[in-house]
Amino acid sequence: MAAGSGSEKRVIVIGGGLAGLAASARLAEQGIQVDLFSIAPVKRSHSVCAQGGINACNEVARQQGFSEWAHMDETLYGGDFLADQPPVYEMTHWAPKIIDLLDRMGVPFNRTFEGYRDLRLFGGSLFKRTHFAGATTGQQLLYALDEQVRRAEQDGMVTKYEFWEFLWPVTEEVDGERRCVGMVAQDLRTMQVRAFRAGAVVIATGGCGLVFGKSTNSVSCTGAAAARCYQAGAWYANGEMIQVHPTAIPGADKCRLMSESARGEGGRVWVPRTKGDKRDPRDIPVPERWYFLEEKYPKYGNLVPRDIASREIFDVCVNQGMGIGAENMVYLDLTHKSREELDRKLRGILEIYEKFAGEDPRDVPMKIFPAMHYTMGGLWTTFTPEERTADSVMDRDSNRERVIGMQIDAKNTMSTNIPGLYALGEVNFAYHGATRLGANALLSCIFDGLFAGVGIANYVRDDAPDEEAVSSAPFDAAVKQEEAKVESLRSRAQQGLTDPAVNPYVIAQELGKEMTDASTVVKTGERLEKALNKIQELGERCSRATLADASLWTNQNMAFTRSLSDMVKLAEVILAGGIERRESRGSHFRLDYPDRDDDQFLKTTVAEYDAATGRPKISFREVITPLVKPRARTYGKVEKSSDPAPEPRETVAAEATS
Amino acid sequence: MGTLHVTQTGSFLQRHHFLLRRLHSLSGIVPIGVFLIVHLTTNASVVWGMVNSSKYDGLHGGAATFQHEVNFIHSLPFLILIEIFGLWLPIAFHSILGIYYATTGRSNLTRYPYQDNWRYSLQRISGYVGVLFIFYHVATLRWGWTFLIPGGTKWDGEFAASTMASALQGGTDGMTTAGLFVSLCYMIGVSLLVFHLANGLWTAAITWGLTVSDKAQRRWGLVCAGLGAGLMALAWSAVIGFATLDPAEAQLAEEHVNRGHGVEPAHVDSNVAMTTSGNEE
Amino acid sequence: MTSPTPVSQDSAKHELGAERSVYFRIKRCDGPGKATRWERFKVKVTRGEGANVLACLERIAANPVTADGAKTTPVVWDAGCLEEVCGACTMNVNGKVRQACSCLIDTCAPNDGDEVVLEPMQKFPIVRDLWVDRSRMFETLKRVKAWTPIDGLYATGPGPKETPERQQERYIYSTCMTCGCCLEACPQFQQEPDASKWDTSFVGANAIGQVQLFNEHPTAKELAPERLDAMTAAGGVSECGNAQNCVKVCPKEIPLTDAIAAVGRAATIHGIKRFFQGK
């Protein structure tokens, strides 16, 4: 029997990061019972990794000419105008309220001498608009929401299902219209597959970094949940929009962010002039080092904008094979600076490098490489626009009488194309367009949960069918489908994997490598097509992938392999979108189409799963741009950047050492 | 499971958890800790009392001073009540509760051989050994279980130093092997008790919230270490003093003191003397 | 990027270049109540690649064959951020508790042929292999009411002002990722599989740190009496034995012993107040 089959209205929230927790807290406050599912204890969600801060207009910035409207404009401009504008309007206008709320929850935001919230300057803005809590803002915000949800749990409004993996949304068709009435999940300890009923299902499962192998994401960020919704008929939008961070520390298991402030403080990027030189970098004399950024950009040197830095590093390593020891890495060298100065200005970030790279960057040049960082694309969602009078304070730069935001109580807010199935947070495509501004991610996740929670509660109360009224047939079918997958995987189990062709870990590595090589910093139609072929092959191998563990107790091997086939589906969406988008916009840089083409592509890419072929069907939808007319995204000539997001850690480091 | 004990021993311990814990901590300091300091100071007088030798006509000043102290204590009123409520019950309370509390812990020194962790384990070991030592000490000298004393010396409050010396030396004819063993046990026993008190004072300051910061804890740690070192010096000097004291020489001094106080040794009921002087040991 | 190299059965060439072999001795258990066993694996690592314990576990998962050539199942472990901020991958590495993600092979097993010993945390019920169930820690957070009792999620203005000093003090406690290192190393904290006894078992250092965190916040301190009730009840702060291992193993360097003393002080005052108020 499915849980929650009582008469109470309930919502299933899948994912316990910022968006999922914000939604849970909001729904519980609205008197809706929440079943919160997460593959890990929610307090360990990937949101903890965010460091820099959270953007919001504030009184200090306002008195210098900043406004909510300006924040919106920056966000749209940063995202190269690919985002629908009303959601961005609403999010930026809610931002100050969200900061206040987090403040009340007890988030230890950094303080000024007088005790007010301190602010820091972030890229993409001339105003200090970023609030921060030490070097772990994401962690602090997540914990604050986690605490509020624990409180709701104590009050009996939230039931947590931790170590449960979402497998499939359950839908029923009434009068030709589908709606989501629950889902099937699996307990990752007992491996029990079970259906759960609910008035609505909220997907808040984050990004898909693991599709790219080693990214800056957590191990849970497979994108599998989104991929499953996509295969169940939900649209996936702007899949090709993936943010790559230029300086990350490549590790054996993942890539960790390295602050841009290292370059700001004089760090020099170089590779050995001799291909595959394996000498200790300290033994390589200066004439035998290739300071390629300084050579190619004599004026700006190592401080070229991020997208250029990313592309050049990528070009040197991938195309020219000039990376350190023929690997995809370049040196970021600070060893010419005095230890004292480095400690004073950069200690925080240098310690992170020391901890995870095992070398002291004051003595040895750091090894860095661009890494997949954020998924702007995601499940397609809709909203109800609401026209209202422009606010003389918040919209002071707009020169408009009327503005358009989102209607808060609308039942379709952040609904996917399947009613009753919502997508919030990073898995929602809505807010960041073609690239995300630094310190906007935390804002979008919390806003999504708090804002959409109201409409979801309305939907569940008014429109969702009574749980008893829903036939058990679709639940039984979905459970059967998922149990069949489990059995199919188990039937292929054999201890001690031998054949790499069907080894899921080998397939995952190949997937990550192919996606990173073909679809991150620089793309071409030809390379994407080639990658798509490779992905087809991987998909085929995935269907034969062999487990090394057939047990029905805490079988991570099975969960991993199942997710892998879903990641392959998502990879197809990402590549297909990239192929069809024959322009360059934001993070999507096509060498064969280097310019932005608003006439053809000021449009949202929508991928729809074709059950017959198993392939995505790509179509384009108009971007809703009623507020700001898209303009060229140049950041002046000097500051042109596809990713104006500043490095979160840099200011932290500066403050920690000052 | 350590926690299993909590429910097994009933809800009394749970209901009065905090009070009992705090009383346990307090009882270790007052009265037990205070008593230990007084006791060690008194007993060490067998050494520091040597400065009084001229006062006692050139007789053994240490033995004389010690006897003088013992006689003073014997003269206190309501001594038996002071003993019971000020000493025996607190020690029993502190020991029984302490042993119970100690069983809820599991030492992990092999994995975490930090200094503080050593102190934690040593505090519990010194508690266990201390209880055994106190039992031996009281049983042999207070209850007259002379069969546990090599040489079978019966401690006599009128001849406090000389009988004590005989008890530690295994007889009246100089140090025997068995006597050496007893002296060594005393050495270890008092050392562990001194450690237990000094370390207990240090942790009590944390428990009660007097020393909150790491700095304050380290500062207070120095004070406790200093106190411990001082007490250790007293304890060792007492044990060494008695272990090396010539009983015959001591007896001369004791007789001198007792005469000075107008008490004829022949008239002393040894049972009375034992009863009223037990707290000295 | 350096792709993880599946372990090769052919060991003859492992000394080439900077590549070397390390051995992993892993305490394995198929599930609660099942017998434990030790298995030894050989993993190839390259000096300077930044391989950590988890990267090696991935390599073992990709080729689950023991050093003796016996086929086995992949080792099960818990992991999340891999950046030492989520707390998931806590386990015993070479006898000491820590996050496996920040344990680099070049540091913990610097020489060819070195052995790394992995064991699950001992203070929590086993799920499988290196994965343990730490839900007791999250339940304990309820016991000490580790939250700020705000009115609700509607905008009602800013929170209370706070001095930078106070913020810094609270921030460090707020970086606690509930990893459980402090509990694993604590001689006073014992495993308790029976959830009904969690409410009277020792809360442990992390929860005491959370009490301090919330009792220092202007709004959250409204619940301080209730938190101190928990702290003065069975399993409260006075079960601490002052071994102070917690503060030494805390990966975030949270001053847990300061918190224990501060909460001890508050508990003393709270206890005296209650005594005289006759509650």
Image (cartoon, coloured by chain):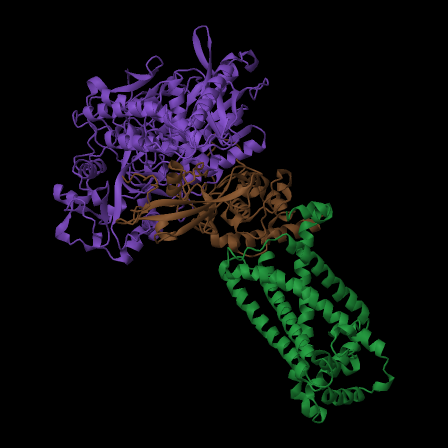
Chain colours: A purple, B green, C brown
- Residue A529 is situated, as x and y percent measured from the top left of the image, at 22, 23
Q: Is residue A271 left or right of residue B55?
A: left
**In the foreground, B226 or A58:** B226
Q: Is residue A492 left or right of residue C196?
A: left
Q: Residue at x 25, y 23 (%)?
A: A533
**In the foreground, A349 or C69:** C69
- Residue C16 is situated, as x and y percent measured from the top left of the image, at 27, 48
B161 shown above or below A636: below
**In the foreground, A363 or B90:** A363
Placement of the N terminus of chain A among the 4 image quadrants: top right
A94 shown above or below A420: below
Question: Is residue C125 at least partly visible in the picture?
Answer: yes
Q: Residue at x 82, y 73 (%)?
A: B275
- Residue C218 is situated, as x and y percent measured from the top left of the image, at 52, 44
- Residue A527 is situated, as x and y percent measured from the top left of the image, at 20, 26
**In the foreground, A266 or A184:** A184
Residue A501: quadrant of the picture: top left
Residue A32: quadrant of the picture: top right
